Amino acid sequence: MKVLVRVFVLALIAAAFYAFSGPNSASNGENNGAFITQNFQCGMFDGNGGYYIGNGVVSVINNGRQEILICNASGVPNETGRAVIYNNFYCDTYLGQTTDSRETVSASGQASLQCKLLLEE
């Protein structure tokens, strides 16, 4: 139950950051039909199961049907002494919510979050 509450809080905070931070840079890829946003913040787990704000986010939407969101951070708290991996949690993207998600927090505090969303036709 505690993990479910944390995932719910993470989803709410991520939605708030999505609503208020917005992209600083966007480009419409005319040659490949991709829409790319970058340089905004995201909500991540830390290695202890808490919440952390990451930077360096890139979101790529290909042909309006598939999105890949990537967020990286350094200095993320992790007192476990080992890598911590989170899988299949709710992740908010521009196109919607997905559970095709993975985050890894290394023992040294490097974190990488990836969320993938494929819209149905």
Image (tube, rainbow, N blue to C red):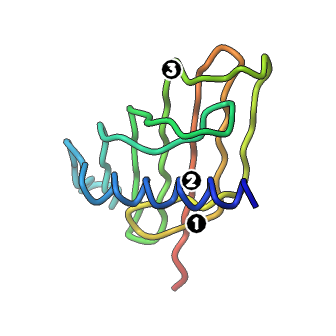
What residue is shown at x 45% (from left), y 70% (from top)? 96
Earlier-in-chain disc, 3 versus 1: 3
Choose top left, top right, bottom left or bottom right for residue 117.
Answer: bottom right
Type of the residue with mark 1 = Thr
Type of the residue with mark 3 = Ser
What residue is shown at x 54% (from left), y 40% (from top)? 51
Type of the residue with mark 2 = Cys
Q: Residues within 10 Å of mark 1 (few under 14, many from 20)?
A: some
* Horizontal side, residue 36 vs residue 120: left or right: left
Cα separation between marks 1 and 2:
7 Å
Taking depth in this image into account, of 91 and 37 the one nearest to the observer is 91
Taking depth in this image into account, of 112 and 5 the one nearest to the observer is 5
Earlier-in-chain disc, 1 versus 2: 1
Earlier-in-chain disc, 2 versus 3: 3
* Horizontal side, residue 116 vs residue 18: left or right: right
Choose top left, top right, bottom left or bottom right for residue 95.
Answer: bottom left
Q: Which residue is mark 2?
A: 115
Q: Which residue is mark 1?
A: 98
Residues tagged 1 and 2 counted as in contact (Cβ below 8 A): yes
